Image: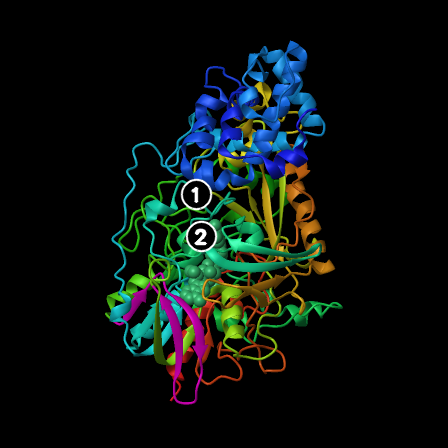
Amino acid sequence: MPADESNGLTAKGGRTDRAAALPALRAAADRIIPADAWPAGWEGGVAEYLTVDPISADRDLAWAWPALVSLAARLDDEARRILGTAPSSDDPAARVSAGFADLDPAAQDAILAAVAAGSGARSFDALRRVCWEGYYASSDGRHPAGLDMVGFRGVPEGVTPIEPEPLKTIAPAAVQAHYDAVIVGSGPGGGVAAQVLTAAGKHVLLVERAPYLRNDQIRGDHLHGKRNAVYWPTVGPGPGHPRVAQLPEGDRVLDGIDDASIYGLNADAVGGGTRIWQGMAWRFMPEDFSMRTLYGNPHGASLADWPVSYEEMEPYYTKAEWQLGVAGEEGGLTRRMPRSAGYPMPAMGTEPSRELLGAAAERLGWGWGPIPLAINSVPWDGRAACVRCAQCIGNTCPVNAKNGSQSTFIPRAIATGLCDLLPDAEVIEVRDGAGSAGVTIMADASTSPVELTVSADVVVVSAGAVETARLLLASGLGNDHVGRYLHDHRTVTVLGESAHPVKPYIGPGHSVATLDHVHADTIPWGGGVIVDLMGLLPLTSAGEPAPGVPGWGAGHKEWMRNGRANLFGVFAMGQEIPLPTSRVTLAAVKDRWGRPGAALRKDVHWTSEQVEDGMAVQGARWLEAAGITNIRRHGGPATASAAGEHSCGTARMGTSPENSATDPFGRVWGTSRVVACDSSLHPTNGSVNPTLTIVANAFRVAENLVAEWPR
Ligand SMILES: Cc1cc2nc3c(=O)[nH]c(=O)nc-3n(C[C@H](O)[C@H](O)[C@H](O)COP(=O)(O)OP(=O)(O)OC[C@H]3O[C@@H](n4cnc5c(N)ncnc54)[C@H](O)[C@@H]3O)c2cc1C
């Protein structure tokens, strides 16, 4: 009887089984990626990935081995039926006779096709995925053949990566008993708070739970980096940080080593998400601050106006652009947001996709322009200009041209001598009091944890929308609004094929945008921005062959080499309408310190689906006008991932405790000395990426804190 998947998935996968499976797996990998001018799959990277590299072979691929062993047994059995030799035995030692590897390629292909189309589909898919990962993804220092075959270079030729001078940190023993302020989290919210408070002469302790990794430790890993991160994200919290995703099909416990998107990870790093972001640095439009006034409040939703207008935010946007460092151009993308100053740097240079979509936008009569990016288009702030590498998003910059909390706000704060940066340290409790606030910190968290108790005039919580809410809830602080209204953005991808390659491996990624469908007649509920598709990593392309391209074999490999470069599309991001039921609560599962993990629930309002559908229609129009063929919406409606890179709203600002978690300046209602200062404050999240608004608002919140320092 052929081995079936049910017994293989559960019972097999030990070392002896693996060794016995290798001949068939090798032969199958070489049919999934056959040899031509470039090596076959096994030699080209799959062997090393599957059998040599201990990180992949023993840790990451633990999920795959049972399926692979089962598949190999099945392939051998099928082969022996053809060859007329004895059927397989459950005893691996008996499976040494002729098998799948002894068939000619045509017979192997026939068996694989039958298995893939039948009851072995899941096992076959597991092998195919492992082959793509082994052949087309760099990780843990591997550089497989597929990368050279498709012309992918992590760093452009002639560029020698530099490692920036590490930020000065302090050891747990040097932490003082009292600070003017303790800031929890070193992302853009926390970084701005540190810069503003130290500039005002306040002594701050900036606590970051992620260990301090070098830039080269957060670059070029296509399996653990924050774009394809399916295994142990480098910028994840690691094991011991469980969350519960409350999904329609039931609760699912996830640890910090799981698929980053399901886990709801932004990025844990010194610098938070901005250490590895793409840097799209938009201002919200004036309408984004008055969503409830403009659109009412459709049943079940909880739209709210910001307690601050665009006019009040404008000086802070200008400050944010100049303090962070944004390369942009005034014109088609800025005309609806009045500005008191230009951009500090010219826009990033053009590329084929901008030319193509720009011309198409002209034909459609749409406004368009180069995306404002917090990346140096020219040398700026003592750092180099972007070298246009092809893996910007999700990675650190090879020449430190990316502007984020780690390269701007935090160094300035440390330069004052008043900022003590404590990485690898997790705040586990915040205390509020009439005369003083304080925190409990687990320092040296990943090595030999030590508990510290620190008091402060003020605690600024900037841990990101999920963790800020979790920390406040676990500390018993704030009202019933804390944790509610968890939302992000709705996104949609529309793909097609261009006549010529328009997205070669030139960074930094997204290049061109239109804002004509933001607060316009074409898409309801505020709509969203549409941008060109970022350059896809080779591994991502492998899973997205054009219609008609075989899913594996010589045809797929040929497409990867020659057709993949014509894969093109647009990505759109728009309003997600908040609901009170979408929220962060405390789960029954406990983290490494015995604290409750975050439970994440996301309900998707019908209005959000309309935004998504509208963006898909307009995205397809843009592609059609650009002469793109085979236009298709990718993956259907986006799933209801509970949290994400743009999570916000869980400590929404407002005018009273009746309608919000904090006052208009982030002071948590019901506390005397606790201030939130990050994405959690956003009542709504605009029709564009949020971070420039997080930064601008953080300047506003932190400057107010200095002006109204609690006594
Ligand atoms: C790959 C990627 C690309 C992105 N691209 C863009 C883009 O182009 N444009 C854009 O606008 N946005 C982008 N973003 C989103 C952007 O990074 C976030 O909007 C932003 O970082 C949120 O800032 P924050 O200050 O709210 O929180 P975060 O940046 O998440 O910072 C919070 C920090 O707090 C730390 N922390 C959490 N809990 C604790 C604790 N208890 N104790 C101590 N420390 C703690 C975390 O480790 C983290 O470092 C991107 C994000 C990613 C991951």
Answer with left or right where residue 159 lies relative to residue 20. Answer: left
Circle 1: residue type: Pro
Q: How is the image coloured?
A: rainbow
Q: Which numbered marker is on residue 466?
A: none
| Upstream in sequence: badge 1 or badge 2 | 2
CB-based contact (under 8 Å), mark 1 and mark 2? yes
Q: Quadrant of residue 508?
A: top left
Check disc 1 and report its element: helix, strand or loop.
Answer: loop
The location of residue 637, given as percent across then percent down, is 69, 48
**The residue stretch that appears in magenta:** 418-443
- Say if the magenta span includes residue 137: no
Q: What residue type is disc 2 on?
A: Gly
Can residue 683 be seen by looking at this rendering? Answer: yes
The residue under the point 49% across, 56% down is 266
Indicate the position of residue 647 as horizontal and vertical percent values: 55, 61
Q: What is the number of callouts on the image?
A: 2
Q: Is residue 628 visible?
A: no
- Asked if disc 2 is less than 8 Å from ligand 1, the answer is yes
Q: CA distance from mark 1 to mark 2?
A: 9 Å
The kind of secondary structure element at disc 2 is loop
Q: Quadrant of the N terminus?
A: top right
Residue 540 image-quadrant placement: top right
Q: Which residue is mark 1?
A: 508
Q: Quadrant of the C terminus?
A: bottom left
State the image coordinates of residue 589 (x, y, percent, origin top left): 56, 63
In this figure, which residue is indicated by the disc labeled 2?
279
Q: Main secondary structure of the magenta part?
A: strand
Residue 397 in percent (x, y) is at 36, 46
